[in-house]
Amino acid sequence: MLTKQTIKQQMIDDISQMIIIGTLKKGDFLPSIRTMGTRYKVSRGTVLLVYKTLESLGYIQGHERSGYLVTGGFLSAASDPKPVRSAAVTAEKPAEEKKNTLVFSQWLGCSNRVQLPKHFIRRWCEESGTLSLPTGGEQADKNDQLLKKNLCRFIRISRGIPLQPEHLFLLPGLQEALLLIAKSIAATRPHPVLLIEDPCPPNIRELFECLHFTVIPVGVDDQGLRVEDFPDSGADLIFTSPAHQFPMAVPLSTVRRKLLSEWACRHDALIIENDSFAMLGFGQSVIPALSHRYPDPRIIYLTQLSELTGSGMNVSCIVAPRPLMQTLRRLAPLLVSDIHPVTRSLLSAFLESTRFMKYLTSSMQSRRQKATLALGGLQYLPDPCCNGQENASFYTFHANISELPEGLLDRYFFPVNLFRHPSSADTHSNNTLVYPFALLSCNEIEKINHQLRLSQQRSAAAG
């Protein structure tokens, strides 16, 4: 068992290492003392001692009412230049342009598909000249490289994966990324066979079926994907979500991770590692990725930002084996559209901003609050048997559908059988439900809890 002193030293090592290697850069605000205490399961006093130690070492500096920010990174000024605003931007804008920019920033900030802080969106729109952003050419390439650099930083913080910008392939969304992967595999392997988690989102399975893949569903239990059920005949591609499988809400066990790697090597198969449900992570609770270093010769790493930014500002990332990357780049202009310049520029500025770490940890804190509320409500059900990880956005539980309060089914709770392959749905109970609580507000979850509590009371009175 870790002692208080050991945890304190681990926190100091974790933070100082991220500062030294540049994952946390000069000017970044660290998570609040309360957030770090929750993350490492220590008292506020212990976190304060850690921050004071780092401050005495010159790594960070405390600011009243603002928190602690990084001051001692080893990055030179040249490697992290401050943006220089051109005369055109700094000049006073015409009244009409100011009005249009304000309207645009309000539209972005009020959209329920964009989750970035409203004050950041407004400030960025005012400073960047949003309505006159370049749409292509050399400037677009520079913006793309900057976004890749900042995405590498984010992925290192949230998932612990070291990446280089040149390894990233960016696309507007997850479906575009899967389409490109599927067409690239089909271009090199005739009559491709896909092993896919069952259950999984139907749109993923249907995409591969439309592209004439032979799709073989493989079951998921409390240890994750049942690798031992893989066919002896082999396959070309395996789709799995090893950190947070949707919708069963279980991670792939260490034993099955090893079996998966061995099977893929033995049958010359590639693995699509879908990491999309694991991007709100930081610190001790992070479930590791399949590989320690990417590109990996067997793994196509795939993730997206929608959990953090909302679907309206989404970007997906692929890191593929080098031979496959050449095919991806060749087919991309034919299959996918470019990322919108506003999305590219706004996301890059946000991920690079000094407030990003605070936003990430506050998002995780909000997720935990929702998870606690949702789990509390499910306890009003008889023996719900819940599955779900701390950083996941959904729970899976068991309930008698006929006994659920009216209006909850197919609105907040969904049968897992909806996500199963048609060939296997009939063999499983329809009383296993998925609860995507992260899509709801705390008020909505509390109203659901109220309905569940009243239902329990009525059942107890009737019994």
Image (tube, rainbow, N blue to C red):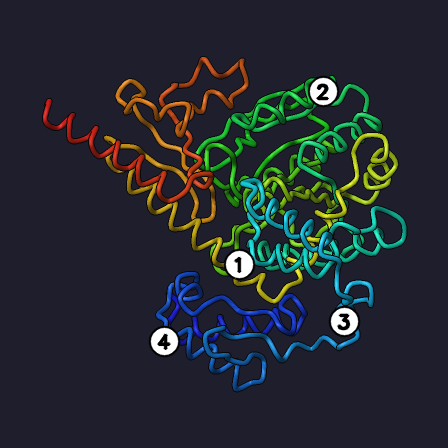
Secondary structure of residue under mark 4: helix
Q: Nearer the viewer, mark 3 or mark 2?
A: 3
Do the residues under discs 1 and 4 have CB atoms within 8 angstroms?
no
Q: Which residue is mark 2?
A: 213
- Image location of residue 66, percent across then percent down: 49, 73
- Image location of residue 36, percent across then percent down: 44, 65
Is residue 249 visible in the rendered structure shown here? yes
Q: Which residue is mark 4?
A: 45
Q: Quadrant of residue 444?
A: top left
Say which of 321 and 422 sits in front: 422
- Image location of residue 232, percent across then percent down: 64, 24
Crowding at mark 2 (Cα within 10 Å: few <14, some 14-19, many 20+): many
Q: Is residue 10 above or below residue 185?
A: below
Between discs 3 and 1, the one toward the N terminus? 3
Q: Which residue is mark 1?
A: 359
Crowding at mark 3 (Cα within 10 Å: few <14, some 14-19, many 20+): few
Do the residues under discs 3 and 1 have CB atoms within 8 angstroms?
no
Between discs 3 and 2, the one toward the N terminus? 3
- Residue at 50% of width from left, 36% of height from top? 224
Q: Which residue is mark 3?
A: 81
Q: Is residue 162 above or below residue 209?
A: below
CA distance for labels 1 and 4: 22 Å
Secondary structure of residue under mark 3: loop
CA distance for labels 2 and 1: 41 Å
